[in-house]
Amino acid sequence: MISQSLRGKLWKLNGAIGIVSGICIFIGLFLGLVVAPADYYQGEVFRIMYVHVPFAKAALLSYCTLFIGSCLYLWKKDLIVDNLCHASAGVGIFFTSIALITGSIWAKPTWNTWWTWDPRLVSFAILLLILIGYLMLRTFVDDRKREATYAAVLAIIGFVDLPIVYFSVEWWRTLHQPMSISTRGVSIAPGMLMPLIFMVIGISLLFSYMLMIRTQMLYLQHLLEAKQGGLLSEEVL
Amino acid sequence: MKLGETQSLRAIYVRWAVIVIIAGVLTVLAVFRYNREVFAIPIETLLRNKPDGIVRILGQVSAGTLVKKGDGSAFFYLSSERKQTEVSVLYTGKPDDNLRDAKALVLTGFFDPDQMQFAAQKISPIPNSGFVVSAYLIALLPLILFLFSMERNLIRLSVLIKEERPYQKG
Amino acid sequence: MPFFDVVKLILWKDVLAEVRSRETISSLFFFALNVILIFSFSFSVGQDVMLALMPGLIWVAFGFTSILGLGKSFLSETHNDCLAYLQIAPVPKGAIYLGKLCGNVLLMLVVEIVLYPLFMIFFNLNILVKIPSVLLISFLATVGLSALGTLFSILTVQLRSREVMFPLLLLPLSVPVFIGAVEATQGALGGEPYFAYRHWVELLFVFDMIITIASFWMFEYILDY
């Protein structure tokens, strides 16, 4: 499906994406840590948002990439798309767990609690569990094509289910916990918005850079296994 | 760079060394800003050293001592974090929501040694920088390590694939 | 072979196998009984707090029982290459899924219907006046759990670590079923009118529809790779 010349162009584009993302992240960190003033109510703690929000957006990006890649795989049966899904899940676990941890660190000084049963937090935790289950399923299935199909099916069912989880937890929470704590409604002054924008763009570009590198790594791993097995089968290419 | 050719391992090391150096520069700049704008001394240090000029102190409004006037100014006692010493504070700034009973605050102003009173002009929330530092470390250090190891693995795999010869009689 | 004939055939095969050996249903029933027993000792609270916790306990017990029961739904097919024969059979694969789903729902419903009177006896619950709503909630929640469980069963039944993988995959995705079932059962047993907990029942219904259709569609790909 993806020709050799297209892959060469994508690889060069990836290098450019890496450089741009690095520049955006450094500008974002500079503005966020050195230039931006502290928040009126939260003080210095607000600066945690400059890492938490971009990582959370990258986690959601990985979740969407996993879904689109899985649908594409079931349609075209291209094993490189399957590598993309595998890479997306791996990178997604990284971003989701760090988003959850930094969110928890932000919550402690702000609301004096490490965890709250907010629908967004619970959905992120369930996304993490789904991604972990996805990677474990891939590890335990032996046959390459079967692994790809099963993983794609799991990803699609997980994608369909996560919004339902979000809404059901939201209804449950309005019933049992008062809306005094909310992850929404954090009003941001313009001086504090610019670093956030730079960081979000930078980390999203960094996510796609990591995705490409990890996809290439998985492809090379499968190639090496095939070579060491003695036969370069068409399956792996 | 064609697909199939890869960068050398040295290029990876150089690139990441540059990134770590820039991160170090950013950290130093951030620490300078912190010292300039945020750093606050505890009350015991204030009473011991009696510094001149504008200082920032950190403490908690003693329960029951807060007296607010109509124009926003207030008088209260600020106790240290270990609740061992107190200093009286006269706040002469704008009306401030952060000024509440038993709230931990950072005050910016002058200290008068003769009257043992602190004339505060600005109130800020406590910095909680331990949380900020740990969050950034947890986010950025694994990111750098993960990316670095992935790029190194890529090179290592390419080298291994080039060297692997199928059907070679061992 | 026409679609619903396949569904009926698979359902009949599973029911017949179960009626003859009775091994799954008896193990599920006694497992649920043990779970209820452990729960009644695990919380050192008074009778009224226990009644408030009841819907949660009921659905945790049924959930664990489903994990046990649903994980095994394709186990009998792994012997004698039956899965390979199912793959090459010229029947619509979605019909196989629906047949298995009906079998699982029937099995779990039988276990639940036998267990509700025991709940009444042990915990002094008054279910008799609300039997229609409790049955409806049980049915919808069981269909939801079984829809997910049947799909994940065929994903995990050939793996070495199926006992670990199946609950790991099932539990995060079945959170809406548990929330909806517990809240609706609490509303029903608490004597509230149907209007008060109506949206939980609707949540269960929407979940069932979406997941059954998605799994039905995905099943083609699993048996067709």
Image (cartoon, coloured by chain):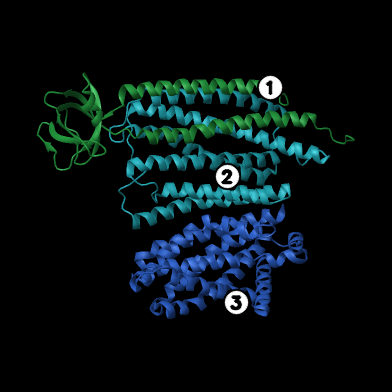
Chain colours: A cyan, B green, C blue
**Residue type at mark 2?**
Phe
Viewer-side label of 1, 2: 1
Q: How far is mark 3 from mark 1, CA to CA?
A: 64 Å
| Dot 1 alpha-carbon crowd within 10 angstroms: few under 14, some 14 to 19, many 20 or more | few
In the rendered view, tell whether residue C184 sits above or below residue A216. below
Whole-percent x, y for residue A30 in the image: 42, 23
Viewer-side label of 3, 1: 1
Q: Is residue B63 left or right of residue C143?
A: left
Q: Chain of mark 1?
A: B
Q: How far is mark 3 from mark 2, CA to CA?
A: 40 Å
Where is mark 2, residue-wise?
A67
**Element at badge 3?**
helix
Which of these two is toward me, A122 or C130?
Answer: A122
Kindly indicate the quadrant of the structure image that contains residue A229.
Answer: top right
Where is mark 3, residue-wise?
C26
In the rendered view, tell whether residue C20 sits above or below residue A100. below
Q: Chain of mark 2?
A: A
Whole-percent x, y for residue B142 in the image: 53, 34
Q: Chain of mark 3?
A: C
In the rendered view, tell whether residue C94 sits above or below residue B66. below
**Residue type at mark 1?**
Ser
Furthest residue in direction left, as rendered: B70
Whole-percent x, y for residue B111 in the image: 18, 24
Name the residue located 44 percent from the left edge and 60 percent from the top edge. C179
Furthest residue in direction front, as rendered: B48
**Element at badge 2?**
helix
**Residue type at mark 3?**
Ser
Where is mark 1, residue-wise?
B8
